[in-house]
Amino acid sequence: MKIGIVGAGTMGGGIAQAFAAAGKYSVTLCDVSVDFANKGLARILARLDKSVEKGRMDKAAAQKILAAITAAERNALAGCDLVIEAALEDIALKKELFAEQDKLCPPDTIFATNTSSCSITAIGSAISRPLTGMHFFNPAETMK
């Protein structure tokens, strides 16, 4: 299953890491630019390195997680089975991001938002398919 994450900040990066750590997903991490997505990937690498240093995981496990995540432009999400939005809590931005993905992704791609304060119904009004809430707590990569 291919997972797409829109937003490479603290939450988006943590969500990407959590899916990659499950061992059965390939994850595409996107943001406003590939540079921002790469910065998110660098933060994931720093967290993994810290976990290795503290003995919480071995280097091979950390490398496997990192290998499952690719930083890319948002148009790379077109091949994803699940797209999770983890952008700023700005309803206009969220609607714009989903409208963009609604045009790119096949009709069977599942859309989810990590919003904690915006109306899911209002965000979903910008797209032609259902939208679900999929809220992760911070730090997403360490929650069960």
Image (cartoon, rainbow, N blue to C red):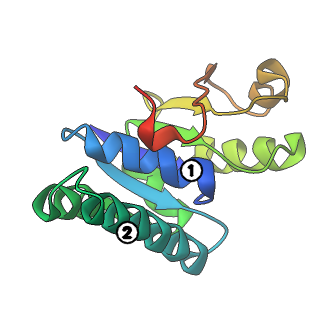
Q: Secondary structure at mark 2?
A: helix
Q: Quadrant of residue 72?
A: bottom left
Residue type at mark 2: give it. Answer: Leu
Outermost residue on the front side: it is: 54
Q: Residues within 10 Å of mark 2 (few under 14, many from 20)?
A: some
Say which mark, if any, is on residue 64: none
Q: Secondary structure at mark 1?
A: helix
Q: Is residue 27 above or below residue 18?
A: below
Residue at horizontal 19 percent and vertical 38 percent from the top: 24
N-terminal label among 2 and 1 = 1
Residue 122 at x, y percent in the picture: 85, 25
Q: Is residue 137 above or below residue 130?
A: below
Residue at horizontal 71 percent and vertical 43 percent from the top: 99
Residue at horizontal 61 percent and vertical 23 percent from the top: 129
Outermost residue on the left side: it is: 60
Q: Residues within 10 Å of mark 1 (few under 14, many from 20)?
A: many
**Which of these two is toward me, 98 or 17?**
17
Query: For the C terminus, which image quadrant?
Result: top left
Query: What is the C-alpha distance between the residues marked 2 and 1?
Result: 14 Å
Q: Quadrant of residue 63?
A: bottom left
Residue type at mark 1: give it. Answer: Gly
Residue 85 falls left or right of residue 109 = right
Residue 25 at x, y percent in the picture: 26, 42
Q: Which residue is mark 1?
A: 12
Q: Which residue is mark 2?
A: 45
Residue 139 at x, y percent in the picture: 55, 42
Residue 35 at x, y percent in the picture: 57, 81
Q: Nearer the viewer, mark 2 or mark 1?
A: 2
**Which of these two is toward me, 88 or 141?**
141
Query: For the N terminus, which image quadrant?
Result: top left
